[in-house]
Amino acid sequence: MAQSEFVFAPLGGIGEIGMNLSIYGFGDERRRQWLIVDCGVSFASEEQLPGIDLIMPDIRYLVEERKNVVGLVLTHGHEDHMGALIDLWPRLDNVPLYATPFTAALFEAKRLGEPGAPQIPINVVPLRGRLTLGPFDVEFISVAHSIPESNALAIRTAAGTALHTGDWKIDPTPLTGSKTDAERLATLGAEGVLALIGDSTNAVRDGRSPSEAAVAKTIAELVRTAPARVAVTTFASHVDRIRAVADAARAAGREVVVVGRAMERVVQVARETGYLDGVQEFRGADTYGYLPPDRVLALCTGSQGEPRAALARIAEDEHPDVALSKGDRVIFSSRAIPGNEKAVDRVINGLVAQGVEVITDRTHLVHVSGHPRRAELLDMIGWVKPQILIPAHGEALHLAEHAELARRASVPQVVVCRNGDLVRLAPGPAQIIDQIPSGRLYKDGILLINAEARTVASRRRMSFSGAVSVALALTDQGALAADPEIELFGIPEADASGASIADIARDAIEEAFESMPKPRRRDPDAVAEAVRRAVRSAIAQRWNKKPICHVHVLEV
Ligand SMILES: [Zn+2]
Ligand SMILES: [Zn+2]
């Protein structure tokens, strides 16, 4: 019998920030059992992918292998780790899900907020819990992060143990969530760790991340000294930050008004799960207008510049309950996720134009990342002492820096892989042994489409250079029965000399048609192709852009 192998494969989250989904396999080549870790999304930018909001990993391989999948474990409740679950779980035919209490409650609240979402049961695992799933023994180890209950997973098999760090940092003084359980990690290291699959997000940054306590202090000072109204925006799921804001408001004699659905949802989940114990009650947005300016603090969604979120609407002066004006202060207790910078700047400019003072992390310690910097990465390597290190959760640069750091810290084997690589962890030296099908899905309206389909590419072409539609009526004698019908979409009406583009297209059509040999004119496909080329090149001469052209030939 072939020896059982322990393998790892990322289907998303490597070489990119977002859409984390990894699988661990155990067994021989003919039959492996699989454990899925996380099921996240990433956010599309409007310019690159017009009309697409979310990107998720293509899980066709897991759909095929469904009978060998023993479960799906969530490390924590961020969208880049669980945001694809509502869309993808139905394809995985009731695969059992596991998460700690806050993550499970946050997921359930999100699911209830999404019309038409199916029932999705989650098995709740206690903090520091441990469970057996097929050949895998999975232990949850608490780590500090920017949401309560982030977990590293110790995945033990007969061939060795992998530590999947999930998202983590070291914060000796968090306000609400857990500290990183260094003691447990060191115990695991003493037991022996084969592979460390680790968060690389901040591998380019030296030193250590500041603590949430330091951020809380800055926020308290900025709220205390604010002359009039204060609004604070942060990631809705950042409960530590919500607590810091609440404490700052209380110390300054201000009421906290919660503005935005996502923030209301997280506040409710955090209260139910005990993460806001001891924090004063918050008020609804409808009370904002009744409170004096120096007695109110609005806690808003929209730190990423999302156009429909509370802060963007306030910046446009279009929010039904909340308005700001000259002398008020807005604190961005956040940082723009790459790709969102322009949207955030738009909101900031809208506020500044209203005379509002805007404070960001460019000048004040009002935000700190939830990911480990280099000194923290070295601490993790020191605790765990892995034989193999695989950088995960990062773009190419982050992975390379993490790999280099690990080599310098004398980790015996470092494997930099890509989505779809199947890495053998044991037995024998770690190496990429195969490729498994991987890719991306786009959420387009309510459909999931394959990224390789031409849909979005042709939509982007249309958005860049428009389209022209031509209808021709062709007699069986090969003559035009009427003037061609031409419609332009997203194309200028006239060229630089003022000549109508539609007329230019019409002349091109007639010229192309007449220059065809007579017998060819009876072939509708040949006519359509000749006309299409002629129209595109005639428009390109006057515009320097080639539109999409569709020619419809009717035989009459
Ligand atoms: Zn996270
Ligand atoms: Zn993440």
Image: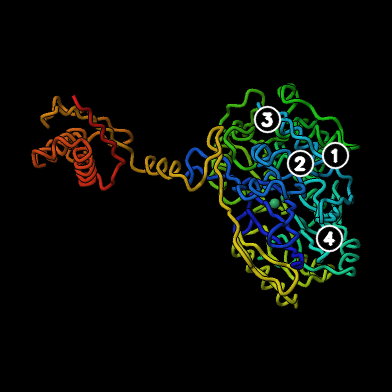
- The image shows residue 13, relative to residue 251, as above or below, that is below
| Residue 138 shows in this picture | yes
Q: First in sequence: mark 4 or mark 2? A: 4
The residue type indicated by label 3 comes to Ala
The residue type indicated by label 4 comes to Arg
Q: First in sequence: mark 2 or mark 3? A: 3
Q: Position of residue 71 (x, y in %)?
A: 77, 47
Q: Position of residue 338 (x, y in %)?
A: 58, 51
Q: Closer to the observer: label 3 or label 4?
A: 4
The residue type indicated by label 2 comes to Val
What residue is pinned by disc 1? Answer: 251
Camera-nearest residue between 248 and 465:
465
State the residue at coordinates (22%, 44%): 533
Q: First in sequence: mark 1 or mark 4? A: 4
Task: Please identify the quarter of the rendering in which residue 322 is found.
Answer: top right
Q: Residues within 10 Å of mark 4 (few under 14, many from 20)?
A: some
What residue is pinned by disc 4? Answer: 156
- The C terminus - image quarter: top left
Alpha carbons under labels 2 and 1: distance apart: 9 Å
- The image shows residue 226, relative to residue 412, as above or below, that is above
The residue type indicated by label 1 comes to Ala
Q: Secondary structure at mark 1?
A: helix
Dots 3, 4 in contact, CB < 8 A = no
What residue is pinned by disc 2? Answer: 223
Dots 2, 1 in contact, CB < 8 A = yes
